[in-house]
Image (cartoon, grey):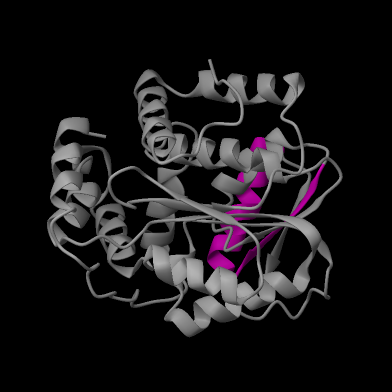
Amino acid sequence: MSVPAMIAHLLLEQLPREPLLRVPESDAVMEAPAQVEAFAESGRDQGILAYVYLFHAALSLPVIRPGDLVLDLACGPANQLAQIARLNPESRFIGLDASPRMLDLARDTLARQGVDNVTPSYGDVTCLNNLGPASVDTVLCTMSLHHLPDTEALAQTMREIHRVLKPGGGLFLADFGRLKRQATQRHFAYDRIEQQSQLFTADFLHSMRAAFSLDELRTAIEDAGLAAHGYHTALAPFMMIFRSQPRRVVDRSLTLRLQQAYRRLDRGARRDFDNLARWFGLGGLSLPCPVR
């Protein structure tokens, strides 16, 4: 992140009164081979999104108990899911996605990383008809809700989460927030243009434009009867997280796993992780344990 430029953009975000109009993604399911591969590559090992995946894995720790059955909605190539599953080896995970290409990549990711507590599964997040009522302990969805076509699909997804989630279950939702200025959206999409492919840059910008607003996501969650507290980055919601009450204490063994994963990031990625943690910390959401 180019912090001084980002601060300038986020300060300018205070001037408009309302978020930009939402521009839905042209394709709800990512299937184009080049686009799928560009997205998958960005999250591998030292890819440009590696620090974001570890950050969300860290923030999700308090809602996942050992022995849980965890449903990850729109798991994509499973780079994020593999990170979470490695940190929670005592839990079982279902990675759901509507793209066969993504699921093929997910299987490759899990096999390559030796992750054996995840089952990839085909399915639509708005209709979880392969899962019965109160059948899962925790539901996750990271950086994927913006692919939904409209607020009705968002509301239906939240209703399905409520249906399949056990009472007192865990919930962790993370996504971009819709901003107020096109220039700010372009800043985030183009900030690391020399480190990312053109396809990834275009997809990043489309994702920012397709993001739901903080109020839209909060309304969908509350109307579905889900209990989760909302947080967003300071000054403006360029990223937002909704998380249920903690269901476990992040103990020493779990802390050590997270710290080992943090040390595997390169120096630049660790700096980006720390900066993102500061932005959320200023917004009221702290890491559940130290990473250093």
Chain part drawn in magenta: 91-114
Residue at 54% across, 79% down? 155
What residue occupies the far top of the structure in this picture? 292
Magenta run includes residue 78: no
Q: Is any atom of residue 263 visible in this view?
A: yes
What residue occupies the far bottom of the structure in this picture? 152
> How far across and how far down the image is residue 48, in percent?
37, 38
Q: Nearer the viewer, residue 217 or 43?
A: 217
Give left or right: position of 86 versus 209.
right
Give left or right: position of 169 versus 17.
right
- Number of numbered labels in the structure image: 0
Q: Quadrant of the N terminus?
A: top left
> How far across and how far down the image is residue 33, in percent?
42, 64
The answer to which image quadrant residue 16 occupies is: bottom left
Magenta run includes residue 103: yes
> How far across and how far down the image is residue 201, in percent?
25, 53
The answer to which image quadrant residue 256 occupies is: top right
Residue at 38% across, 18% down? 267
Instruction: Note whether 278 is above or below 22 in the view shown.
Output: above
Q: Is any atom of residue 32 visible in this view?
A: no
The answer to which image quadrant residue 75 occupies is: bottom right
Instruction: Note whether 102 is above or below 158 in the view shown.
Output: above
Give left or right: position of 184 versus 234.
left
What residue occupies the far right of the structure in this picture? 67
> How far across and how far down the image is residue 96, in percent?
65, 64
